[in-house]
Image (tube, rainbow, N blue to C red):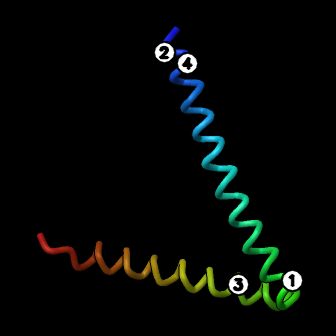
Amino acid sequence: MDENEGKGMDRLYGFLFVAILVTILVSILLFAYLQKGVDGLGELASGLFLLLIWSGAVTLYQKLFKKQ
């Protein structure tokens, strides 16, 4: 019985974690839309795109020039 209860709690915690992340993301998108309209969402998307490019470049640099 204890094993099944533990799995249920893990699922609950996972669901709560995802629900909180979705709530935060939706609130950020709604704030950007209410402040600047569709242009605000475009600026937010371009900023996230540049952030992903930057993190990818850092990861690539670390893999290429990793000290052995």
* Element carrying mark 4: helix
* Viewer-nearest residue: 31 or 64: 31
Is 66 in front, or is 13? 13
Outermost residue on the top side: it is 1
Mark 1: few/some/many CA within 10 Å (<14, 14-19, 20+) = few
Q: Earlier in the sequence, mark 2 or mark 1?
A: 2
39 left or right, relative to 52: right
Q: Estimate the spatial distance between the alpha carbons at disc 2 and disc 1, rounded to whole Å.
A: 46 Å
Q: Secondary structure at mark 3?
A: helix
Task: Look at mark 2 in the image and give the residue it sits on.
Answer: 3
Return the disc, 1 or 3, that comes first in the chain's sequence.
Answer: 1
Q: Where residue 66 sits in the image (x, y, percent)?
A: 20, 74
Instruction: Tell me the residue that label 4 is attached to.
Output: 5
**C-beta proximity under 8 Å, tags 3 and 4:** no
Please report whichever mark, 1 or 4, sits nearer to the chain's N-terminal start. 4
Residue 18: numbered disc: none
* Cα distance in 3D space between marks 3 and 2: 44 Å
Q: Compute the Cα span from label 1 to label 3.
A: 13 Å
Q: Secondary structure at mark 2?
A: helix
Tell me the mark number nearer the camera, choosing from 1 and 3: 1
3D distance between C-alphas at marks 3 and 4:
41 Å
> Could you classify mark 2 by the number of other residues whose Cα lies within 10 Å: few (under 14), some (14-19), or many (20 or more)?
few
Residue designated by label 3 = 44
At label 4, the amino acid type is Glu
Q: Quadrant of the C terminus?
A: bottom left
Which amino acid is tagged 2?
Glu
Kindly identify which residue carries mark 1.
Answer: 34
